[in-house]
Amino acid sequence: MLTLHTNTKISDTNGKATTQLTGYDFNSYCQIGSSFFACSSVGIYKINSGNKYDTSNISSVISTFSTNLGFSALKRLRFIYLDVETTGQLKITTYADNVLAEVIIVTPGKQGRQYIRVSHSRASKGCYWSFKVENVAGCWFSLDILETLPVFLHRGRG
């Protein structure tokens, strides 16, 4: 019997990226051809679908730390730029000084690698910003670059 209550860390040796899966009680994970396999102390398992786990979509999230973007002034974000490869929609959540600023659903113009510019509301301002990028409906994505275009408000420190 395989119990699913632990975390598994996965490393992509080609792209030098790591991720963490919750609920996978495996100590090894690999891809052979187009099939994915996971190993534990009780056996080897073939993962039947790349974006499903127990018939539920697999949620993928990338969260950044809070940053003042190198300047202590208050700022608004004008645009967010993503260099991303995806098979579906992404959800971008922004936080200004640890308060929810905006939630944006991005629908890429195509599948595969692309550079996307996303407009951000001018209503929020803050000194420290953080970002969360999530998949929608279990789509696969790989984020290489997240950049912003801040507008500095020289009205004091945040």
Image (spheres, rainbow, N blue to C red):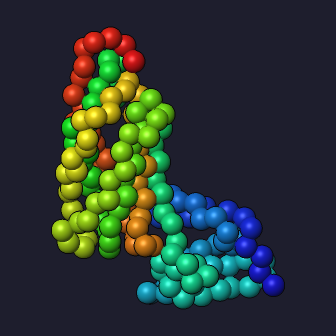
**86 vs 158, nearest the viewer:** 158
Residue 26 x %, y %: 69, 72
Does residue 15 appear in the picture of this structure?
Answer: no
Does residue 6 appear in the picture of this structure?
Answer: yes
**46 vs 139, nearest the viewer:** 139
Q: Is residue 97 above or below residue 24?
A: above
The quadrant holding residue 107 is bottom left
Residue 54 located left or right of residue 40: left
**114 vs 92, nearest the viewer:** 92
Q: Residue at left 77%, top 76%?
A: 3
Residue 15 located left or right of residue 37: left
Q: Quadrant of the C terminus?
A: top left
Q: Residue at left 32%, top 21%?
A: 74
Q: Quadrant of the N terminus?
A: bottom right
Count up the numbered dots. Answer: 0
What residue occupies the far top of the structure in this picture? 156
Residue 6 x %, y %: 72, 64
Residue 63 x %, y %: 47, 48
Residue 39 x %, y %: 68, 79
Q: Is residue 58 above or below residue 46?
A: above
Residue 39 located left or right of residue 10: right
What residue occupies the far front of the structure in this picture? 123
Q: Residue at left 54%, top 88%?
A: 48
The quadrant holding residue 154 is top left
Residue 150 located left or right of residue 42: left
